[in-house]
Image (cartoon, helix red, strand yellow):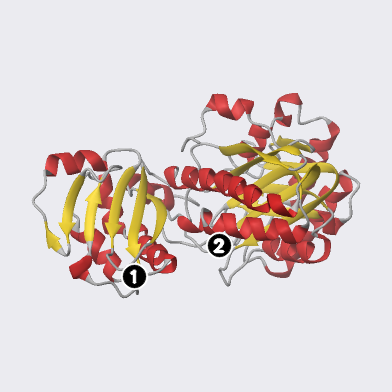
C-alpha cells in the first residue's frame, strides 16, 4: 500500500460492509472545514481499542475505556470531532464527552455506552457543545448532504495539521468468505510510540468476539503505530478503535490471517502518518537488525527516530552517520560499538561503518540516498538475529513554524 493517499484513492475509499458514515462542518475549526463525523452500524458490533499511555488522558479516552469495559460486544459506532481535544478540561470536559456520546447514540437509537467518542485539537479548550449538538443532528437529518456521506469525507473531518487524509483497506479470506478491513487515521504532530500516537477508526465485516478482536488489535498496533515517531511527543488523546460488524464468519483458525491483514492496514496508516509529519518532506525507514531481542531492536530504532540531529541531517541530505550511532548509544540498550555496521539505502547501497570502524564511502552517493522517499538507514548491532523497523520523517524549518504558531 502507498505511503500517501491520493485524492483518487480517497474518493474511492469505503468502509467495510455494514457501516455508514457522515461528516459535516459544525464550526469547531476556525477554517470552516469539516470537523465532525460519525461512523455507525445498524446493529451491535464487537469493538476493541488501544489508548494513550500518557498519564494525562483526555475525557474521550476515559469515556471510551468505560464504554468498552461495559459494552465491547454491542458498540454501535464512533463520533469524532476535530478542532478541540477536550483534554485537561476537568469535570466539565467529562460531562461534555458524555453528552457528546449520548447525543450521538440517541441519533442512531443506541444507548450512550454503545457509542465511542474521539476528539482532537488544542488541549485545554472546552468543547462548544451547542455547535457540536447541532452538527450531530445535521449528520442524521440529511443536512450534511450526499457528498458528505463518503468515507473519504470522514477521513478529512478528523484531520488537524495533517496535509492529507489517510486511508487504507485490504481484503482477507476467512472461513465464512472474503472480509474487508478498512480504516482511516489522523496524525502529523505529537506523534511518538506506545500506544498508537494518533487517532484511527478501523472497520471490518469479520465476525470476531471482543476478546479476539482485542488480541488482534494489540498485535497489529505493536507492529505499526507503536513503531512510528514524528517529534517524540505523546498525545493525551491517542486512540485506535476497531469495530467488527460480524457479517463474515471468522473461525479460531482464521485469527492469524485476520491479525496479519489488520496489521497491514495499521502499518499503512502508520507509515502515512510518519510521512505526513509536520513539515516533513520524506519518510525515513530505520531498520535495526542483529539485535539480541526484538525489544532491543525497537528501542534502538526508536532512539534514532527521536533524534533531532538525525532527522535534520536527513532533511539536509547530510551523511553525518555519527549522529545515528550516537542516538543508538543513548538508547539505554547494551550495544557493543565494535560489532556495529551501518548502511544507507534500500539495498544497503552504501556502507558507512563496519564493525565499529569508519568505511571510506562516496559522500555524494550517500547524500543522494538520503533524498529518497523513503530514506532507508540500516543499523546492524551484531548481537543476535532479532530485528525491528521504525518509521519517522525528516525535520524541516516548517515544523518549527507550524508548532510555534499553532494557537496564534
Residue at 65 percent across and 45 percent down: it is 28
Q: Which residue is mark 2?
A: 195
Q: In the picture provided, is 170 more to the left or to the right than 203?
A: left
Mark closer to the chain start, 2 or 1: 2
Location of residue 104 in the rendering, given as x and y in whole percent from the top left corner: 82, 48
Q: Is residue 90 left or right of residue 167?
A: right
Tell me the quarter of the picture where residue 64 sits. bottom right
| Snapshot quadrant of residue 149 | top right
Q: Nearer the viewer, residue 175 or 319?
A: 175
- Tell me whether circle 2 and circle 1 mark residues in contact (CB < 8 Å): no
Q: Is residue 335 above or below residue 36?
A: below
From what the image shows, is residue 383 above or below residue 133?
below
As rendered, which of 329 and 399 lies closer to the eye? Answer: 329
Looking at the picture, how far across and down is residue 233, in whole percent?
46, 61
Badge 1 marks a residue whose secondary structure is loop
Distance of label 2 from label 1 (alpha carbons):
19 Å
Q: Position of residue 18 (x, y in %)?
A: 80, 38
Position of 263 with respect to 323 (left or right) is: right
Residue 165: image x %, image y %? 55, 37
Query: Which mark is drawn over residue 331?
Result: 1
Structural crowding at the residue carrying mark 2, measured as other residues with C-alpha within 10 Å and reported as few (<14), some (14–19) or many (≥20):
many
Q: Residue at x 49, y 61 (%)?
A: 193
Amino acid at each position: 500500500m502507498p505511503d500517501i493517499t491520493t485524492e483518487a484513492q480517497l474518493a474511492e475509499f469505503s468502509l467495510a460492509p455494514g457501516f455508514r458514515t457522515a461528516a459535516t462542518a459544525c464550526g469547531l475549526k476556525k477554517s470552516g472545514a469539516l470537523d465532525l463525523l460519525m461512523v455507525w452500524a445498524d446493529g451491535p458490533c464487537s469493538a476493541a481499542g488501544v489508548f494513550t499511555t500518557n498519564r494525562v488522558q483526555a475525557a474521550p479516552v476515559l469515556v471510551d475505556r468505560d464504554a468498552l469495559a461495559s459494552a465491547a460486544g454491542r458498540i454501535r459506532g464512533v463520533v469524532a470531532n476535530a478542532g478541540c481535544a477536550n483534554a485537561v478540561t476537568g469535570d466539565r470536559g467529562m460531562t461534555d464527552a458524555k453528552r457528546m456520546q449520548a447525543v450521538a447514540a440517541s441519533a442512531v437509537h443506541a444507548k450512550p455506552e454503545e457509542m465511542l467518542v474521539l476528539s482532537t485539537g488544542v488541549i485545554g479548550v472546552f468543547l462548544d457543545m451547542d455547535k457540536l449538538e447541532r452538527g450531530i443532528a445535521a449528520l442524521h437529518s440529511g443536512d450534511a448532504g450526499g457528498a458528505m456521506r463518503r468515507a473519504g469525507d470522514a477521513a478529512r473531518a478528523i484531520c488537524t495539521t495533517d496535509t492529507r487524509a489517510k486511508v487504507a483497506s485490504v481484503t482477507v479470506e476467512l472461513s465464512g468468505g472474503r472480509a474487508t478491513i478498512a480504516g482511516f487515521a489522523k496524525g502529523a504532530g505529537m506523534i511518538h510510540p506506545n500506544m498508537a500516537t494518533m487517532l484511527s477508526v478501523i472497520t471490518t465485516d469479520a465476525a470476531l468476539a471482543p476478546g479476539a478482536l482485542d488480541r488482534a488489535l494489540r498485535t497489529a498496533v505493536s507492529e505499526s503505530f507503536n513503531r512510528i515517531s514524528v517529534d517524540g511527543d505523546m498525545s493525551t488523546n491517542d486512540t485506535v478503535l476497531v469495530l467488527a460488524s460480524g457479517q463474515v464468519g471468522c473461525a479460531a483458525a482464521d485469527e492469524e490471517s485476520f491479525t496479519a491483514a489488520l496489521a497491514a492496514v495499521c502499518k499503512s496508516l502508520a507509515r502515512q502518518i510518519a510521512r505526513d509529519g509536520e513539515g516533513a518532506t520524506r519518510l525515513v525507514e530505520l531498520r535495526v537488525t542483529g539485535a539480541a531481542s526484538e525489544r532491543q531492536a525497537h528501542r534502538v530504532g526508536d532512539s534514532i527516530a527521536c533524534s533531532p540531529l538525525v532527522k535534520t541531517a536527513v532533511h539536509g541530505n547530510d551523511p553525518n552517520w555519527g549522529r545515528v550511532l550516537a542516538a543508538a548509544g543513548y538508547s539505554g540498550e547494551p550495544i557493543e560499538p565494535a560489532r556495529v555496521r551501518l548502511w544507507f539505502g534500500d539495498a544497503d547501497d552504501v556502507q558507512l561503518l563496519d564493525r565499529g570502524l569508519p568505511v571510506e564511502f562516496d559522500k555524494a552517493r550517500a547524500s543522494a540516498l538520503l533524498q529518497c522517499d523513503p530514506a532507508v538507514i540500516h543499523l546492524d548491532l551484531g548481537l543476535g538475529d532479532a530485528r525491528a523497523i521504525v518509521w519517522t520523517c525528516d525535520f524541516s524549518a516548517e515544523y518549527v513554524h507550524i508548532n510555534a504558531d499553532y494557537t496564534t
